[in-house]
Amino acid sequence: MPDEYGSYMDAGGYGDTELDWRGCCVKFPDRLPGQTPSEAVRIHANSAHISVGVKTAHFDPTGRLVVTTDSSVTPIMAGLCSSDETLSARGISQGPSIGSTTSIYVFYSGEESRRLYLDNAADYDIVAGALANFWLMWATVRHRGTPGGKSPRERLDLLEARVTELEGSP
């Protein structure tokens, strides 16, 4: 039931708790000659990498990665991000700031002990590479559950049973 532990603090994921998921993989490919970092960075989507609910990825003038979603990710339950093995091996980490439709990520170089400004070509080149990926995911609560609440599958089964029952009625 909502609010068991305080305002907006639910006790658990009951059967009727519903979440919306958004996520993607952002790729940092090597820049082509004359290409800016913002022109190089892209959402990586193909038969092996799907993007759900993410519209754009670019760098702002302060060197932060800005990712926009198709609709609000509030109320947010979780906003996760992770460097892949390529970036992790280089000591690259990041900190997220999750907003309603815009999330901002600041990147850091552990090897250089400093923040990276990814709109700067030299800093972008530190993270760039054919296999350099950054993974993002948001979980938004669509429906806050209640004890004994029916899951979406259970509700659909009940609805289908009722339709079958009504179809058999004269």
Image (cartoon, rainbow, N blue to C red):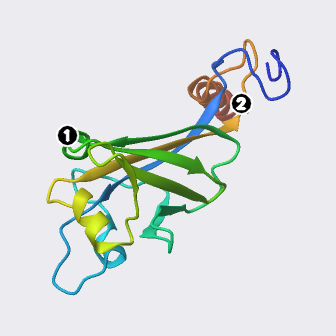
136 on left or right of 50: right
Residue 161 in percent (x, y) is at: 62, 25
Q: Residue at x 56, y 56 (%)?
A: 103
Depth check, front residue: 124 or 104: 124
SS state under label 1? helix
For residue 14, which quarter of the picture? top right
For residue 165, which quarter of the picture? top right
For residue 99, which quarter of the picture? bottom right
Outermost residue on the front side: it is: 113
- Above or below residue 44? Residue 98 is above
SS state under label 2? loop
Q: What's the CA distance linking mark 1 and mark 2?
A: 66 Å
- Above or below residue 111? Residue 160 is above
Tell me, for residue 48, which label it has, or none: none
Q: Residue at x 31, y 42 (%)?
A: 110
Where the N terminus falls, by quadrant? top right
Residue 145 in percent (x, y) is at: 72, 24
* Crowd rating for badge 2 (residues with CA inside 10 Å; few <14, some 14–19, many 20+): few
Outermost residue on the bottom side: it is: 34
Q: Nearer the viewer, mark 1 or mark 2?
A: 1
Tell me, for residue 89, which label it has, or none: 1
| Amino acid residing under circle 1 | Ala
155 on left or right of 106: right
Q: Which residue is drawn at 70% across and 43% down?
A: 75
Count how many numbered circles sit on residues in the image.
Answer: 2
129 on left or right of 15: left
Depth check, front residue: 130 or 52: 130
Disc 2 target residue: 169
